Image: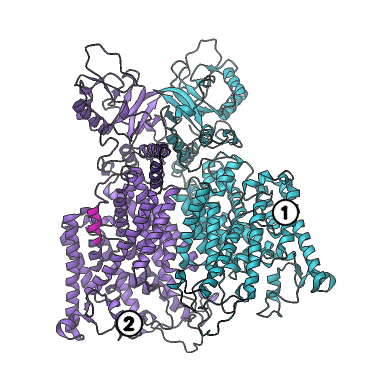
Chain colours: A cyan, B purple
Amino acid sequence: MDFLDEPFPDVGTYEDFHTIDWLREKSRDTDRHRKITSKSKESIWEFIKSLLDAWSGWVVMLLIGLLSGTLAGVIDLAVDWMTDLKEGICLSALWYSHEQCCWTSNETTFDDRDKCPEWLKWAELMTGHSEGAGAYLLNYFLYILWALFFSFLAVSLVRVFAPYACGSGIPEIKTILSGFIIRGYLGKWTLLIKTVTLVLAVSSGLSLGKEGPLVHVACCCGNLFCSLFSKYSKNEGKRREVLSAAAAAGVSVAFGAPIGGVLFSLEEVSYYFPLKTLWRSFFAALVAAFTLRSINPFGNNRLVLFYVEYHTPWYMTTQLGKYPVLEVIVVTGITAILAYPNPYTRRSTSELISELFNDCGALESSQLCDYYNNPNMTRPVDDIPDRPAGPGVYTALWQLALALIFKIVITIFTFGMKIPSGLFIPSMAVGAIAGRIVGIAVEQMAYHHHDWIIFKNWCRPGADCVTPGLYAMVGAAACLGGVTRMTVSLVVIMFELTGGLEYIVPLMAAAVTSKWVADAFGKEGIYEAHIQLNGYPYLDQDEFTHRTLATDVMRPRRSEPPLAVLTQDSTTVEDVETLIKDTDYNGFPVVVSRESERLIGFVQRRDLTLAIKNARQKQDGVVSNSVVYFTEDAPQLAPNNPQPLKLRRILNLSPFTVTDHTPMETVVDIFRKLGLRQCLVTRSGRLLGIITKKDVLRHMAQMMNQDPESIMFN
Amino acid sequence: MDFLDEPFPDVGTYEDFHTIDWLREKSRDTDRHRKITSKSKESIWEFIKSLLDAWSGWVVMLLIGLLSGTLAGVIDLAVDWMTDLKEGICLSALWYSHEQCCWTSNETTFDDRDKCPEWLKWAELMTGHSEGAGAYLLNYFLYILWALFFSFLAVSLVRVFAPYACGSGIPEIKTILSGFIIRGYLGKWTLLIKTVTLVLAVSSGLSLGKEGPLVHVACCCGNLFCSLFSKYSKNEGKRREVLSAAAAAGVSVAFGAPIGGVLFSLEEVSYYFPLKTLWRSFFAALVAAFTLRSINPFGNNRLVLFYVEYHTPWYMTTQLGKYPVLEVIVVTGITAILAYPNPYTRRSTSELISELFNDCGALESSQLCDYYNNPNMTRPVDDIPDRPAGPGVYTALWQLALALIFKIVITIFTFGMKIPSGLFIPSMAVGAIAGRIVGIAVEQMAYHHHDWIIFKNWCRPGADCVTPGLYAMVGAAACLGGVTRMTVSLVVIMFELTGGLEYIVPLMAAAVTSKWVADAFGKEGIYEAHIQLNGYPYLDQDEFTHRTLATDVMRPRRSEPPLAVLTQDSTTVEDVETLIKDTDYNGFPVVVSRESERLIGFVQRRDLTLAIKNARQKQDGVVSNSVVYFTEDAPQLAPNNPQPLKLRRILNLSPFTVTDHTPMETVVDIFRKLGLRQCLVTRSGRLLGIITKKDVLRHMAQMMNQDPESIMFN
């Protein structure tokens, strides 16, 4: 089979919502590569073309890095501006965010970096009053109004222009990378709308993150650049290698963590990840991080965030789910109303996390650092001993506890909505709040009861024994780990985020413990759960341990009609057309004869349809009575027979076979590792049946006592 | 096939220097698992046993972490002491190293941490003089003598007790992990001798590292603990999962880099690395790093090293290679003679690297920091501007240049010797020296010519533009990357080593560039080159792009006798015994009859031999004339025939088949991903031939114009 000079257009492509055949894609790419190599010896021009081809992979990576880094930078800036727009506006330049506005102001003092005359809250701008209950209520009201406006705009844009832009996209990307085709999911429109609505959704103050969607955005960029090179655009297997690297670039810009991005792509998202893709992902992640850093001029130590996607299954049960726009409006309204009064929920979640991670230095003005000063404080500033908590800390504790409950509840409702949303930041925030509360509690216990056995050995009075900020960091890692079941990539992202290489041991311990605890509730991470919920045909890495054989899974079953096959040289065009019309199988085995049942190959339905249509149009003498043959030479026919039609070109001569006695665990392994679409079953050389990926998934669902029909089929 | 209640001992095991069948191992483990799960419902005791079994993986990881961490700590301490023993001895406690000796001394001042009255050089101890040419020569002589003694002891121990203890072991571990069996390579003796001789070899001052061998030591620990649990000791596939994790623990203690260890195992060493192994490796690496940290009380910021193995192929050509002991003595002698006079080669390589990485702070006393002070120095100590180099720096430059040449040459000769040796540290040292020299050159150029275009834009006069230490770090990473072709794991290890998260971009750029440059010389890293040199049957990840088909590779060839097969119910015991005697194939296909050539299964030679031997001994009526049958029911035989022998139990009913038209790239892919030993070739249901892993490797070598016989066969 030479797919390069395709006999008719579209042969070897796939239909929407179908699964690709990895082995075939790989084989096609090798053919292409071989052709280019042999041509390159012919002329200088062909040689240069072959060099360009060899380097096109790196070029695509460079472009992906540049574009996704740029988009992430633009999104960051836009979110900053629009989040502040809910509170007020900068008079000196309307496009400045609060921070930029006061940053450029001359009248800003170091103590009050947030206050400058150029920045006006809405109430002050409209009424001239900046204090009092009236101004507070007016600001509150406008805050809610802006939030509703942003989220309404976001949900409407998604509904009208790009339904695929909702959610985080990671479960779908995982499914696509495993070999499924969802046309348009990574298209230009999705890219555009997702970028715009992501800014709107985050700015509206909903409890969602932008990091998961950024992975989707980066993958859209990857898909976009694939179309520039036929090497990638015409081969679904090669395209997925690029997408794996794009996912790494996405995480890289989302959290400013290039290594973490590569590991995330490897551990969480990718299906087929050869060493070559590892190197390329590394390069793309590097370029993306570098681009983002050069764009964003406010790299002043703020937490570059990293989110995990968290589409909880529960949203399916709310009645609101039927009215997505209304749902978004209601949730935004509730979020805005409840979030504004509490200082820990009003600010952006990433700022909150950043504050929770911080230790209380000597100059810290946060309410969380309102400790009574220790009288004997003669130490350097970086070694502040434990001190009794002041009233500010107790107030903060109450507010944090309320914020914790609010975040948990609202996050659950937010994730199912039809807008771009990520879960890394919200779940980190939940973990960080819980961690900080525990940290302060332990610190105060250690201060007041340093003679207790647990503190006695390592905590002298007046020393700095407990760092509540570290508790928050570990809490965030543990919560995130429990939600996504990441381990290595989680730890790397956490220390790329915080620069805290010395905390590697508590972070690793938190990651392992949270994985153990979470596994006790169920083996699946949030992505797998979401994939199952949506019924995507995804073959996960779980081990299959049931004692079934290929013969139990293959079609046809005993009660079913025999397998639909073609014979190598005795089927007519009409027979084939009838078969195609009467069945909806994706392909048909070709046998020597119906009696011997010896398998010679497999032919795809789509290729067969195209080939016959093409032959009927262009090849004279091909009529309904013509014999279709798949052998090398035309069969011996009676002289009055019409001209036969040779279809060996579209016949796959190396179909995958297993015997009927093969254990299903081996079959599952083969499907998973080789990325098959289907596999034929034989016994003593006779064709018995067929197992498709669909059959495998259905069988696995059955074995786990799930509804086998919950899997979305082709 | 139920391998749990094995019909006779040793069925399902492998011989030395054979390749395992991954699918079979996996299938056996699933059987075992299934049995335990079904038993666990019978009684409380069985339930507890099943829980213990489920946790045994984590227990093994814990034990590996503890033991390999302990061994690494002991090796560290012993090397410290013995390295210093070459120069002198501590009078207050003979078992103290130089540093410990002066650390505990009361008379040590901060400026001269190296000098204290308790530590005596040999010349001072023996003659009472510590200064002058005589004392220098005596110290020089004793230094050489100790070095020769250590290396002689090391090479003799390796020769006599454990030949497998030489080298780094990483290429062999890579081969073992890919499914090859080398008995004794990870045995107890190897563990013991490698630990002892590693200390001797490193202490002798040879240009070698201890990090590669530490990976071997950790894998030996892994193998040791596997024997405690039948789950791992009886299943070669499961055992390899443990060994992958052990390799991660080894790198973790070698470099103090737990995350880097996991990535190293994933990127460089492992063949089959499921997510489960990732989590376990992570845990083992964590425990190992933690154990090492709690053992080593001198964790005072010194570089915890990480080496890559570097057995250069060139040693094959030295005549000395025939006399391993003499070779070691000669190389040690030359190393000691040349290394002592140059201060940069006399000290341990890790100390050298540590000094080269360091920036010149205000208090630095190193010769490398002998700059003329800038008159207008009113800055904080951590922002020292560029200054003109003093005479010390120029002396250091010359000595470094000599050290560079010496290190490159001696390292090439050292790696092939028959003692435990690693290459991470030596190649890092080479890169770090080169980097530091370039760094100082650029710094001086920038200082003297800051109006040059390249410096103009980013380097104001009097500012700190160039950090030579960073150049050394990047150089070390680049050199190491070029040798091993690591990328992601390299960068992670480098920043775990140095804590320099902010240098992630130059480190990544160095890793990618060095990979590109090195790839231009040849695609293989040092491990792959070594595996090829030794002819191990290792199927690497390189893509196979030739246009050959299964039919071109399978045996028998056209000129050869037909394939040796068994029939399902018409071969006698004698026929089988003759076939076993006359051929040396590892297994035989079983067909329905010689005429139809329909395949029904595959039987291993070893199982067949054992089964027949067992039957002849224990089963009455089995004689040479008995018919062997593989079918469910005994064949219809004439009444005077002897009792037939049923061998269905040892028949593999699901042998792997491909058609003769299958492209070889697909076959190679299948072998690689499924870990097959052999694969049968059919056409239209008829058995045509067989392809073994050996045939695949031989074909690949042929296609690359290499000598196909260079591959070591079973």
Q: Which residue is mark 1?
A: A331
* Residue B419 in sight: yes
Q: Residue A311: x and y, percent? A: 62, 49
Q: Is residue A49 or residue B74 the one in the foreground?
A: B74
Horizontal side, residue B479 vs residue A269: left or right:
left
Q: Residues within 10 Å of mark 2 (few under 14, many from 20)?
A: few
Q: Is residue B564 or residue A700 the one in the foreground?
A: A700
Q: Residue A636: x and y, percent? A: 47, 14
* B34 to A612, vertically: above or below: below
Please tell me whether mark 1 sits on a helix, a strand or a loop. helix
* A145 to A107, vertically: above or below: above
Q: Residue A250: x and y, percent? A: 57, 55
Please tell me whether mark 2 sits on a helix, a strand or a loop. loop
Q: Residue at x 42, y 64 (%)?
A: B494
Q: Residue at x 41, y 48 (%)?
A: B273
Horizontal side, residue A638 vs residue B679: left or right:
right
* Residue A281 in sight: no
Mark 1 or 2: the one toward you: 1
Q: CA distance from mark 1 to mark 2?
A: 66 Å
Q: Say if labels 1 and 2 share a chain.
A: no
Residue range (magenta): B180-195
